Amino acid sequence: MRKATDVFSEWADIGKDLGMEEGHAPAVAEILTSAFEEIAKGDSQFSAIDAGCGNGWVVRILSAQEMCKSAVGVDGAASMILRAIEIDPKGTYLHADLQTWAPEEPVDFVHSMEVLYYLDDIPEFLKLVCSKWLKTGGIFAFGIDHYLENDACHNWSEKVGTRMAMHSEREWHLMVENAGFEVLQMFRAASHNDWAGTLSMICRKQN
């Protein structure tokens, strides 16, 4: 099995990042709409990190929001970060290992789409986000397509050639709670007749 970061660097090199952006856009739109509703209940402005930012497309969406005062993209795939900088040279994009990196100052909002199940230790990463990335009361929103109840994804690891952790919706809920988050919303985004949808969670860092 290859490292996921190597696979995604290769995808960026051959232009597959644009297809990922297009495919994930409907689910991300639902996730961000729900997250923004929660954020709006607090301060009028927010700082943000997109964990596993790819070519930076969600960072650019966040930066365009009137409420957003700063947005940073972080990704472990070097070529994805190069693509992000090429597309958005004025943006802030960092090549780093998500599992060990932490921002200098915690932020109000962390977003992640289609990343978490590639990580070696999901519970530890969730704890890192809660303890080091987010301010108290901050919002963490993420989406994943690879989960037990989505039958269509069960052969992805073999097809892509990289390890993907498989957990049920209940297991994800428990991992998030055990990391120190309150689950505000849990839903399947962009579902349709042939697709179970993106398992999506909007969470708040508890005191």
Image (cartoon, rainbow, N blue to C red):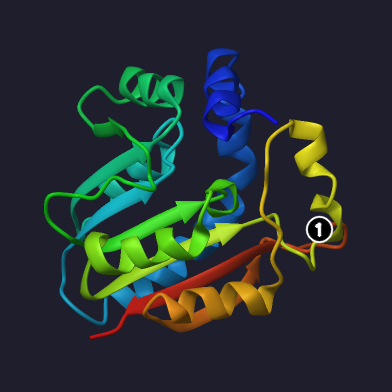
Residue drawn at 26 percent across, 82 percent down:
41
Percent coordinates x, y for residue 62 in the rendering: 32, 50
- Viewer-nearest residue: 177 or 93: 177
Kindly identify the residue that appears in the image at 42 percent across and 62 percent down: 124
Task: Tell me residue 61's x, y (percent).
Answer: 37, 46
Q: Measured along the vertical axis of the image, is residue 28 above or below residue 15?
A: below
Name the residue: 60% across, 46% down.
24
Above-or-below relation of 157 to 15: below
Query: Label 1 neighbourhood size at 10 Å, few (<14), some (14-19), many (20+)?
Result: some
Image quadrant holding the N terminus, namely top right
Classify residue 17 as left or right of residue 75: right
For residue 90, which quarter of the picture? top left
Q: Most extreme residue toward the top, as rendered?
A: 14
Q: 118 and 39: which one is in front?
A: 118
In percent of the image, x 45 and y 80: which residue is there?
Answer: 178
Residue at mark 1: 195
Q: Quadrant of the C terminus?
A: bottom left
Quadrant of the image occupied by residue 56: top left
Q: How many marks?
A: 1
Residue 81, horizontal then vertical, whole percent: 37, 26
Along the line of sight, the residue nearer the viewer: 185 or 173: 173
Check disc 1 and give the amino acid type: Trp
* In the image: residue 95, left or right of residue 103: right
Residue 181, located in which quarter of the rendered image? bottom left
